[in-house]
Amino acid sequence: MATPQQLVPQTESIAEVYATDEASTTSVSPEIQARWKGLVTGFAKLYGQRPDFVARSPGRVNIIGEHIDYNLYDVLPTAVSVDVIVAVKVIPPHGLDATVKIANVNPDKFPSREFTVPRDADIEIDPTKHEWINYFKAGLLGAVKYLRKKTADNLFAPASMEILIDGNVPPGGGISSSAAFVCASALAVMKANNHNVSKQDLLDLAVVSERAVGVYSGGMDQAASIFSSRGYLLYTQFYPNFSVQHVPVPKADQEITFLMAQSFVTSNKAETAPRHYNLRVAECTLAAVVLAKKYNITLTKDTSSLGYSLRNFHQELMRKEGRLGDPLEYQLDAVIQVARDHLGQEEGYTRSEIAQELGITVAELETQFLSAFPVQTEAFLLRQRALHCFREARRVLDFKACLTNARKLDNTRIAYLGQLLNESQASCRSDYDCSCPEVDEICAIARRAGTWGSRLTGAGWGGCTVHILPQNKVDAVIAALKNEYYLKKFPDISPEKLAQAIVISKPSNGSFMVTGA
Ligand code: NG1
Ligand code: MG
């Protein structure tokens, strides 16, 4: 029988294993071992000595719960086996401006760089210049800020380092190469400065670091990259406080597989944020404050990126109506009805209509809610965004209940899990408008070929899809996707790219570190 769901101690430090420790290394597949060895020998060749340690953080797939982390609703991602590994040698002396030499195992695509970390200032990241080392710098910046605070030393100088990186998470592909990169980098910098960072602290700093690149994201990706555990999904809660639980996928009548398929439609999130990602963050916030106003509720600020989330409104409404003791599912049903009743305008709300709802001027609306980042739109679709969010939050609860309330997943339950994924996709497409024709097409092809459920994963507008399917349908689904999508849409696709298009990954371990390599 599967192990029951486990609460995870958040103050726990990141696991550290020794390269010579049989018990921890024999469980690693030969391909992974080869890649790690390649990194260490590559390092020795490049810098003339072996690294002190290797820090690692994986990509993630979100199984269900899309675009609700920044509304502080629960999500259900897990780490995947592709990851970013960072080999580091600390170079004395310590205490001066630090020098960072950084290289990638793929130098043609990711050229080597060297830069200085000034002792008395923050390193600068130019988000308009798309450089591969920006993500390392984001992790470094977050780690240095953390260490300066921790040591109460504003002039804290991090150690100089020689670094070699190998990442195999497809970039811009919806499985969070960015979070893997930022988390692994921050972890590496912590270790290089002799700090055993807790998972919670690494999470907090990694989330803030990524926002520095310009996207007002929630914390799901970094949580999955840091806290996941092999064989489990990571039930992640953000409200009232952050917490995670490891949820096993129980034994089933048929062996269940999660498959991910890239659309190869890249949406540059930082660039499209004013029309896509950040606009959605703003729309949800505005929906929350407009609903609160209708009920005469004053929201207090929460931990979401703009400070007012739909979860926050939900909580205050339930408190007011004396329903906080109701099961969360029923509470969500209630707020779904509230959104239907009180956000009536299908065509959306203009700035002046929202200002009128709130009893403030347009200028006040701009300063209070729309000044953190630019958004480009005439109409804010408050009704559709709120409905997606509340319903998606409900689907996450249903999905988790279906996994945890049974010792064994029979076919009816499995079909229900698939249905929830399909409903999530439909909602992302219509109410949240974060899908795209290619992603819709991949989902349709995959379902025809035998998946139980198919949907986009990650921010969308391209990126990656996730599918739940029986093991015995894997070949058929892969063949259908190749013939009907990849080869048709990209006739000149290289064999390497085609090989990266589809990944089957079992839920994997989160961040860890290897020393003594
Ligand atoms: P991607 O685009 O897959 O990195 C983004 C956000 C998440 C979450 C999802 C949508 C970042 C770093 N992450 O994921 O926090 O909101 O979209 O569910 O932007
Ligand atoms: Mg990302």
Image (tube, rainbow, N blue to C red):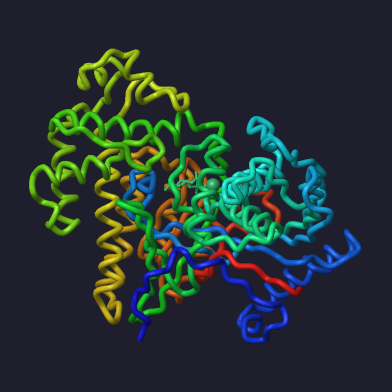
Farthest residue in the front direction?
A: 152
The quadrant in which the C terminus is found is bottom right
The quadrant in which the N terminus is found is bottom left
Instruction: Tell me how many marks there are.
Output: 0
Task: Pick the residue in front: 242 or 93.
Answer: 93
Q: Tell me if 67 is positioned left or right of 210 in this view.
A: left
Residue 508 screen position, x and y as percent: 52, 69
Residue 345 visible? The answer is yes
- Up the image or down, 409 lies above or below 340; here it is below
Task: Pick the residue in front: 199 or 327.
Answer: 199
Residue 23 screen position, x and y as percent: 62, 86
- Which residue is pictured at 64% across the width and 41% down the height? 154
Q: Tell me if 372 is positioned left or right of 317 in this view.
A: right
- Up the image or down, 470 lies above or below 328; here it is below
Q: Tell me if 233 is positioned left or right of 45 in this view.
A: left
- Which residue is pictured at 30% across the width and 77% down the height? 409
- Up the image or down, 176 lies above or below 213; here it is below
Residue 317 screen position, x and y as percent: 15, 42
- Which residue is pictured at 52% across the width and 43% down the height? 208
- Which residue is pictured at 37% across the width and 63% down the height? 235
Quadrant of the image occupied by residue 451: bottom left
Residue 376 screen position, x and y as percent: 44, 22
Residue 172 visible? The answer is no
